[in-house]
Image (spheres, coloured by chain):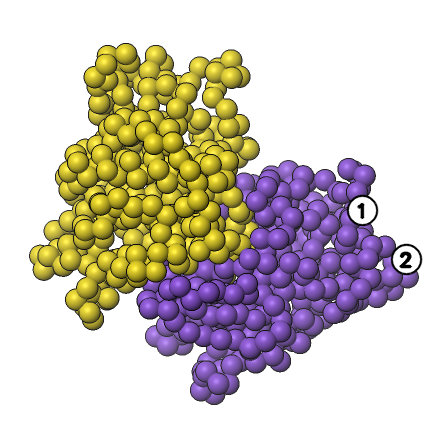
Chain colours: A purple, B yellow
Amino acid sequence: MNTPLKDSTQMRWDPILKIWTIVSPERGKRPGTFIPPVPDNPPQADGEICPFCHHSEISQGNVIYQAADPEKEYPWFVKVVPNRYPVFRIEGTVKRWNEGLYDIVEGVGAHEIVIDTPTCDLQFADISIKRRAEVLKAYRARILDLKKDVRFRHILIFKNHGSRAGAAMYHSHTQIVALPERPLNLQTMLSTSRDHFNRKERCLFCDVLRQERDGASRVVFEDDVYTAFVPFASSHPFELMVIPRRHAHDFSLSTDEELYSLSRVLGNVLQRLNKTLRNPPYNFVLITAPPQSPKLTRPDYWNSIEQDFHWHIRITPRITFNAGFEWGTGFSINPVRPEDAAAHLRNVRLIPE
Amino acid sequence: MNTPLKDSTQMRWDPILKIWTIVSPERGKRPGTFIPPVPDNPPQADGEICPFCHHSEISQGNVIYQAADPEKEYPWFVKVVPNRYPVFRIEGTVKRWNEGLYDIVEGVGAHEIVIDTPTCDLQFADISIKRRAEVLKAYRARILDLKKDVRFRHILIFKNHGSRAGAAMYHSHTQIVALPERPLNLQTMLSTSRDHFNRKERCLFCDVLRQERDGASRVVFEDDVYTAFVPFASSHPFELMVIPRRHAHDFSLSTDEELYSLSRVLGNVLQRLNKTLRNPPYNFVLITAPPQSPKLTRPDYWNSIEQDFHWHIRITPRITFNAGFEWGTGFSINPVRPEDAAAHLRNVRLIPE
């Protein structure tokens, strides 16, 4: 146990709680890790320069991906850059070992930032449908590229909006993390939906969607392609699930037309949340099938994931606290009935774009 | 799905994530549910009256338990009262049913508040060893009493200290919740430790403790009865586990002498945390064997839990945020190596009481 531990990121296995924790000293260097986060105002309001705005240095160097502005007003519409405080380093190989009861994975991975807009003045919910679709296309392009790296077991796309949801930057942005292990929640979903399919030859998510649409008491908005509803057992008030109505396991296979439609549905439901809860902080997580890992699995497994997994987005407003009860039990307390939350969100009148 | 849902607390099962959420409209009525919580100051500082101080109404009515002040300076040392905004109601029976894919438990339970001290001026970390031992005796007395109610599957004792850890009140207090289902985390621990014992005929927690004490790089403090260490895979920086060195599955069987010793160890490590992190907000959770439930289990199961489960306390400073990454993966990011956290905590010089 006195083995010197290096300064790199490690995933450590808790043999009691059966969870992985990522010990990442690099993240400790990030501004705001141990102090209350930035206020919910653009940096310009405090006389500072936003590092993500189109004229700053960060947004000019190290481009991983960018979408051009057709009007040429800005040098770009959407840009993807490396995170300066990555959870994992991109260089190296994955190492796996144990120390007595404990397991360790010395991780490599990718950590990128999607800068959603060239300026601070508009948030993801408020940009045009066309521009939001460009952000979704950036997600698709990055997943397709990162999937090629066989070291990665999953690619996670998420967004922290507002300081109380963990955002360290005001400027609208999304994070992409490629991981050397599959997330615990994803593993649960894969095994639950696998088990359901094996018994019934139906997709669990399709079944949930059908039950929600039959009842409609928790459906908030839908078009021909996507349905947005408040999950029956939402762990947080006003949580939303956005899911393709047609069975589809992999977000990165979405067409341009589908992404345009998704952009419209996301804009719609985020604006409903903003009106109902006065611009709440929220987390946004895109959950899609993990990349194929030929070393780990037989080919028939991958025939199957196409049948039994269903990609979706969870939007979680962060208006309540997780405290000792949640931490001690693993149960959440939601003080708003999902049916009531859905009714509030449906009743919002939006101005059509 | 259009069944009208009543105003009572429900536990709802998420068939995708395999979690229970507690939908508790009653909790939504609590002050501070949807707004930033109270400041970290005594109410007196803002010219208000603390409802938990010995002269207030709440602390005078509805006494469930109290410990007298031997000096008779205050009407009591420790007092247990019902929570005015309970997660569960105490009246009624547990009902279990399903709606299509979804499962529902209409819950009953208990929700009590331990008022740790008669006045606002001292926190749990700062009261005398003798007085803190009286608080621990109140926990023991309430567990022993609530265990008799066959409707309850678990009794959880936890503490939210500081507004950023979810405390709605400044006055030092602890919460006791009796639940109609076993917590997810407890179920994981029970099955992990059961599995370990079945394979090895040793307690998993005793094995972890032995490995920690052999290495000592994460041990912070110990006396003859308890060891406090920073867990190898701590999900939060500076997290601590306090565990009896002798194998013991049930906190409520602790002797007065053991509780006095535990009070000293808890005071010691909390004061170390306070010096290192300048009075951080923290959650404190006491994890002990669940009550016997004769309807559910065979007698030999209960012979076994005495062998394979080990009660302990987790103290989790809340100095980092859980955001989209943690929510999307189920992984935590800890930016401080547990070995470094333990070294910081060991290096604190305390004035002996």
- In the rendered image, the residue lying farthest to the right is A72
Q: Which residue is painted at 23% across and 48% down in the image?
A: B244
Q: Which residue is painted at 32% across and 67% down in the image?
A: A101
B149 or B289, which lies in front?
A: B289
B122 or B210, which lies in front?
A: B210
Structural distance between the alpha carbons of marks 1 and 2: 20 Å
Instruction: Name the residue beneath numbered marker 1.
Output: A49
- Name the spot of residue A9 as percent of width and height, x first: 53, 64
**Kind of residue at disc 2:** Glu
- Name the spot of residue B177 as percent of width and height, x first: 30, 38
Left or right of B101, for residue A172: right
Measured along the vertical axis of the image, is residue A120 above or below residue A7? above
Query: Badge 1: few (under 14), some or many (20 or more) residues near its Cα, within 10 Å?
Result: few
Left or right of B204, for residue A254: right
Instruction: Name the residue beneath numbered marker 2.
Output: A73
- In the rendered image, the residue lying farthest to the bottom is A299
SS at badge 1? loop
B304 or B127, which lies in front?
A: B127
Report the mark closest to the observer, 1 or 2: 1
Q: Answer yes or no: are tags 1 and 2 on the same subunit.
A: yes
Q: Which residue is painted at 55% across and 77% down in the image?
A: A93
**Kind of residue at disc 1:** Ile
SS at badge 2? loop
Query: Badge 2: few (under 14), some or many (20 or more) residues near its Cα, within 10 Å?
Result: few
Number of marks in picture: 2
Asked if residue B110 can be seen in this view, the reply is no
* Image mark 2: chain: A
* Image mark 1: chain: A
Measured along the vertical axis of the image, is residue B17 above or below residue A328? below
Q: Which residue is painted at 61% across and 68% down in the image?
A: A89
- In the rendered image, which quarter contains the C terminus of chain B? top left
- Name the spot of residue A226 as percent of width and height, x first: 60, 62
